Image (cartoon, rainbow, N blue to C red):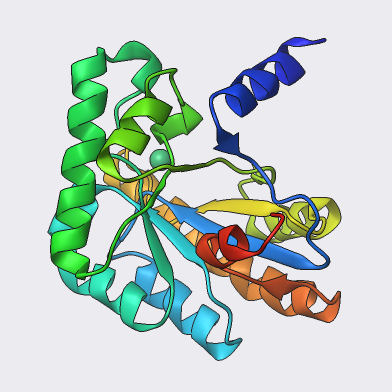
Amino acid sequence: MNDLTFGADLNRLRGVIHRFPNSSNEICLTFNDGPSGYSTSRILDCLGKHEVHATFFCTGLQAQENPDLLRDILSAGHQVGSHSMTHPHFHQSPVPLVYREMSRSRTVLEQIGKSPVRLFRAPYGSFSWEVRPIGILIGMPYLIGWDIAPKAECAEEAADFILKETTPGSIILLRDGAADLETELSAQISRSAAQVIEIAIPKLLDKGFVFKTVGEQLARPNH
Ligand SMILES: [Zn+2]
């Protein structure tokens, strides 16, 4: 067992879903850190053009700053999950703070979006041990990771990576904003996510993949 598989095994024990096995050709597209004035509208336009639904893991803070964008995401038929309130690293946070981050973000997202929030993705994927019991306690029991996260800075390379690595059941991670970075870099990353999906979505559809929200995948029997 190397460090990487050890980390993945630990996360499985903590109840984190990184992909949906037994999928025939379904995949999930997910966005972290939004909603963002730099990219959310453009991402929504692209998803709408291809009639593709995605899942947005939003922070409470970003939702408070961009409430109309959060409502735009939901009214276009996409799903919203929580990505904490202020995006701290949970492995470096005391348990009461983790509780407040999860609980407050859920309340804020539900108040603005008027839609139940049942999914949670920890900032930086830092699913510390207390996240699962807290999630169950507050009604946000589904912990969602990912298996495809392009690192490339250039949109073409990131899209190539996604096309090469995505398999049935994959959960693809892109960033709709960047919670922990300076504004200009955050804007750059956001714009890049929009460019990446503009290239990748038509090609993934050509390969026969079907886009589902995380909630749709969870609702499948035997997921
Ligand atoms: Zn994040």
Q: Is residue 33 visible?
A: yes
Can you name the residue that lies furthest to the front here? 221
Residue at the image point whose x is 78% and y is 60% from the top: 23
Q: Is residue 35 left or right of residue 77?
A: left
Q: Is residue 52 above or below residue 56?
A: below
Residue 26 image point, x, y percent: 73, 67
Can see residue 86?
no
Query: Where does residue 223 sit, x and y in percent of width and height?
Result: 69, 54
Is residue 52 depicted above or below 145 in this figure?
below
**Relative horizontal placement of residue 116, taking residue 112 as reference (left or right):** right
Along the viewing direction, whichever of 85 and 42 lies nearer the viewer: 85
The structure residue drawn at horizontal position 59% and vertical position 25%, both measured from the top left corner, is 11
Residue 12 in the image: x percent, y percent? 63, 28
Could you tell me residue 79's position as x and y percent?
42, 67
Location of ligand 1 given as a quarter of the image = top left
For image coordinates 44% across by 41% down, the residue present is 121
Quarter of the view holding residue 122: top left
The image quadrant that residue 145 belongs to is top right
Residue 180 relative to residue 15: left or right: left
* Residue at point 22%, 57% (across, down): 109
Q: Nearer the viewer, residue 200 or 141?
A: 141
